[in-house]
Amino acid sequence: MTSPAAGKPIRTAIADEDGIDFAIIELFFFAYRDFTSDPDQILADYGFGRAHHRVLHFVNRRPGLTVAELLDVLKITKQSLARVLKQLIDTDHIVQVQGPRDRRQRELYPTAKGRALALALARPQSRRIRAALEDSGTTERATIERFLEAMVNPELRAQIDIVPAQTSGKNHGDH
Amino acid sequence: MTSPAAGKPIRTAIADEDGIDFAIIELFFFAYRDFTSDPDQILADYGFGRAHHRVLHFVNRRPGLTVAELLDVLKITKQSLARVLKQLIDTDHIVQVQGPRDRRQRELYPTAKGRALALALARPQSRRIRAALEDSGTTERATIERFLEAMVNPELRAQIDIVPAQTSGKNHGDH
DNA sequence: GGAATTATGTCAGTACTATTGACGTAATTT
DNA sequence: AAATTACGTCAATAGTACTGACATAATTCC
């Protein structure tokens, strides 16, 4: 049972001693797990996974983004994106359009089908968020929004702010 | 470029129309990604992954939990846990102790080494949380805590409350 | 105009985490 | 004695990620 040179078992629970916020660390884990479980159900019907969801989400949020931009947002490699993107294109959820200025680029856009799926995936998540705000008696939605934003690495917050209000047609005034 | 029967590209960004809270959905993704990236750095030095982190975390939080309880908390299968747990035991981060009442059970305890690693992994995460609370001007930590808890499936909140103040097993002599 | 760089796509190989299903053993319960 | 439970293990598979290498077309630089 206990191997030869095994250390002795520590029988006391790790505490919020040491100023470590185990409560929120743990809650974040549970919250995110359940948050992603909603769309996972739907995705399974399509033979898709979470990677497809993320791609679909960002293509809907920033229509016309290029492959390189998408890789940058998702922080994954080209090879990881390849299969997933191909499947979404083959199933007519996303279309590629040759870049107008630079014809090497592929601008990614959702189709009506892709838009519909993105909405279907977001619906239960949004419902969960709304319910959580109510149940927790959070009067200011912005409190949660600011906290989550502050959890993101500062260098990357720029990526978030690209999308803010209504973005029609050619978004982003940067680059 | 555009395949034969491809749908037309939608050029407008999906909006918070339809009452869908895309802002928080997206922030949650970014926040969790960066939140987990801190320990990932450390884990890589040990040849461990996130699965090891989660096991180590819960064994430290609830020393003496059984394999079955751990599976229930993590919501993974026995087979997924097997390799990870074995590695943590082989590297002397966790020890198994035969259950006192039921000798079929294996109670899991951290060793001093396992306790130290759990703390090292939690430290940057806790730092990030504290900084985020400050940066976002959240005066009440409890607001975030309540929100995150409300995001968790109600059936599973019981798992969370197991740990709160003084914990587990027979010995709650700490503070 | 020619060279270098960039954007994208693809191939091969690998790793980690997860799954389902089946089977074995020991201990406990009925 | 039989059924159930707790745990461990084996085989096979899937999804997502990685690194490194290479090809193509388009753009930019000199």
Image (spheres, coloured by chain):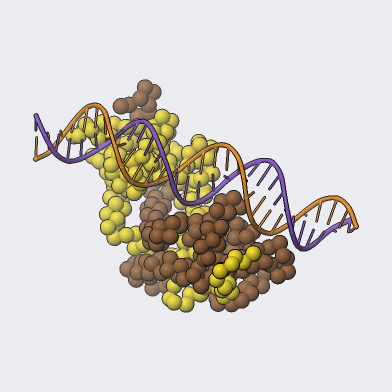
Chain colours: A brown, B yellow, C orange, D purple
Q: Residue B8 or B44: which is nearer the viewer? A: B8
Position above or below: A148 against C13 = below
Tell how many labels. Answer: 0
Quarter-of-image position of residue A12: top left
Q: Is residue A134 left or right of residue D22?
A: left
Residue at the spot x=59%, y=60% of the render?
A: A70
Residue at the (44%, 72%) spot, across then down: B20
Identified at 55% across, 71% down, the residue is B7
Residue B93 visible in the current orientation: no
- Quadrant in which the C terminus of chain A is drawn: bottom right
How far across and how far down the image is residue B130, in percent? 47, 56
Toward the front, the furthest residue is B4
- Examine the rendering and report whether any part of residue A94 can be seen: yes
Which quadrant holds the N terminus of chain A? Answer: top left
Which residue is at the front of the view, B69 or B14? B14
Which residue is more in the foreground, A159 or B7?
A: B7
For the residue pair B11 and B140, the one nearer the viewer reads as: B11
Q: In this view, does D23 lie to the left or right of C24?
A: right
The reply, left or right, for residue B168 in relation to residue A50 is: left
Furthest residue toward top? A4
Q: Residue B68 location, x and y as percent?
A: 28, 42
Q: Where is residue A99 in the image (x, y as percent from the top left)?
A: 68, 67
Say above or below: A160 vs A78.
Answer: below
Residue occupying the point 18% across, 34% down: B101
Q: In this view, does A159 lie above or below D1?
A: below
Place of residue B78 in the rendered image (x, y in percent of width and height, measured from the top left): 33, 41
